[in-house]
């Protein structure tokens, strides 16, 4: 059966993208990347496409254009289902039982892990427990994720000292660890980050890099400028890592963060944020990569602003081809809410249904018989095929009911907040063990040793 699928495309032409590539190449030739890392600069200086200008590493324009064109690739066929993940490392949690905004504890993280695991979600730790010793947090987050979940991992590794412990634990648990290179906008390599990557590069299966400029704050405000800068940072970082670590697979990505001059902060969920996300899709699609997007809003809780902004962002992104949406449940980038997590999942199910489109059986004349049968019955509700279509074509929501006011009153509808709390309670059950007792004992031993050394 054919289905009529909705989709969205942005008005950015191949010639527009060619212009972005040319301007990115010009940026890298004239300004290059600020690389405050003497050993890296020394190694880069020997490459024929590199032009050194003090601490700035510039690249031959034609070499950059050739690299860009070599990365052009078609997008793979898009599936209809969305991949939802949670995480974000928030330093606050909105308590779903008391409504209090407070700092999270280890018990909070373990509860979120249990609920998310039972929802078949993965990601990185949604909150950072403040009752963990600060120097051990990075190590503890990896250990807790691997011991208590199927698909979660730890967060950033910011020191060689903690990285050594994490890689040792990864070897015991049979896990892989990735440390991305983060570029500082505009056009600057994070030297501490690069030093850590250099130390662990041989132990990582592949290398990756990312950049997140804010147009109007850390990048030009208008799209030709910010697209040229983000591409220059991605391709420049890609070339840099490829030269420094020959033979290693390198991937790149980037995300534009909207900035509000009225609040002086990030403006996730704003119309500008969504428009920048659409431009990001158009740019990265040229290189065969459909970016992931986020459940983003700057609302203070799970309120009408959060619902409208998150639905708009997920719907627009999904219609343009995005299938992966992260940090479900995170509020403002600073707090986490389990109630928001449940709402985000409902939003995703709504959008998934839209992506499935509608059945199209133009060649099948059965609908003529259905109309004739309905005329005799007085309604299509009595037509035998209608109930079959209902099961296939009409979504039954988990939370968002569609009833009249009279129906709601007659059925004594349970308030949405209470429904969500019951849902969370039903999910807060212990997941299965993912590591053997022997592996857990080895991880405990490594962790205790780290406690003493740190």
Image (cartoon, rainbow, N blue to C red):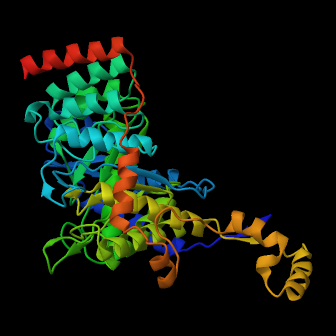
Quadrant housing residue 266:
bottom left
Picture layout, residue 21 above or below residue 442: below
At horizontal 14% and vertical 36% (from top left) the residue drawn is 38
Name the one closer to the observer, 337 or 232: 337
Quarter the N terminus occupies: bottom right
Quarter the C terminus occupies: top left
Q: Is residue 334 left or right of residue 209?
A: left
At horizontal 38% and vertical 32% (from top left) the residue drawn is 246
Picture layout, residue 31 above or below residue 129: below
Res. 254 visible in picture: no
At horizontal 15% and vertical 81% (from top left) the residue drawn is 262
Res. 148 visible in picture: yes
Q: Is residue 389 left or right of residue 438?
A: right
Total marks placed? 0
Picture layout, residue 368 above or below residue 329: below
Picture layout, residue 74 above or below residue 169: below
Name the one closer to the observer, 67 or 273: 273
At horizontal 20% and vertical 29% (from top left) the residue drawn is 139
User: x%, y% of residue 282?
Assistant: 48, 67
User: x%, y% of residue 120?
Assistant: 46, 43
Name the one closer to the observer, 274 or 200: 274
Quadrant housing residue 179:
top left
Q: Is residue 399 left or right of residue 305?
A: right
User: x%, y% of residue 341?
Assistant: 35, 56
User: x%, y% of residue 52?
Assistant: 21, 47
């Amino acid at each position: 059966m054919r289905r009529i699928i909705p989709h969205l495309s942005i008005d950015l032409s191949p010639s527009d993208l060619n212009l972005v590539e040319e301007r990115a190449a010009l940026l890298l030739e004239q300004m290059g990347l600020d690389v405050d890392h003497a050993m890296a600069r020394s190694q880069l200086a020997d490459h024929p496409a590199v032009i050194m200008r003090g601490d700035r590493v510039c690249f031959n324009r034609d070499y950059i254009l050739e690299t860009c064109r070599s990365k052009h690739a078609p997008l793979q066929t898009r599936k209809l289902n969305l991949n939802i993940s949670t995480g974000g490392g928030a330093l606050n949690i909105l308590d779903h039982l008391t409504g209090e905004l407070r700092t999270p504890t280890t018990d909070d993280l373990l509860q979120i892990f249990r609920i998310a695991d039972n929802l078949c979600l993965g990601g990185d730790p949604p909150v950072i427990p403040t009752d963990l010793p600060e120097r051990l947090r990075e190590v503890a987050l990896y250990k807790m994720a691997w011991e208590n979940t199927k698909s979660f991992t730890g967060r950033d590794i910011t020191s060689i000292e903690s990285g050594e412990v994490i890689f040792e634990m990864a070897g015991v648990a049979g896990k892989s660890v990735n440390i991305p290179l983060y570029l500082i906008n505009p056009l600057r390599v994070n030297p501490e980050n690069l030093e850590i990557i250099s130390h662990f590069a041989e132990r990582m299966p592949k290398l990756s890099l990312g950049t997140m400029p804010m147009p109007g704050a850390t990048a030009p405000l208008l799209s030709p400028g910010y697209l040229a800068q983000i591409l220059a940072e991605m391709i420049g970082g890609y070339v840099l890592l490829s030269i420094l670590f020959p033979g290693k697979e390198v991937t790149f990505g980037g995300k534009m963060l909207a900035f509000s001059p009225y609040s002086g902060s990030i403006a996730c969920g704003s119309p500008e944020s969504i428009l920048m996300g659409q431009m990001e899709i158009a740019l990265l699609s040229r290189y065969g990569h459909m970016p992931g997007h986020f459940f983003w809003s700057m609302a203070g809780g799970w309120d009408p602003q959060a619902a409208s902004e998150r639905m708009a962002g997920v719907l627009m992104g999904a219609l343009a081809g995005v299938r992966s949406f992260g940090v479900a449940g995170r509020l403002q980038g600073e707090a986490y809410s389990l109630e928001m997590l449940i709402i985000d999942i409902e939003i995703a199910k709504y959008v998934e249904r839209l992506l499935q489109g509608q059945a199209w059986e133009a060649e099948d004349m059965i609908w003529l018989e259905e109309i004739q049968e309905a005329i005799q019955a007085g309604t299509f509700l009595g037509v035998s095929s209608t109930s079959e279509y209902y099961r296939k074509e009409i979504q039954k929501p988990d939370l968002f009911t569609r009833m009249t006011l009279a129906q709601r009153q007659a059925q004594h509808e349970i308030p949405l907040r209470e429904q969500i709390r019951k849902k969370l309670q039903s999910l807060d059950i212990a997941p299965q063990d993912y590591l053997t007792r022997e592996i857990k004992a080895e991880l405990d031993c490594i962790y205790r040793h780290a406690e003493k050394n740190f």
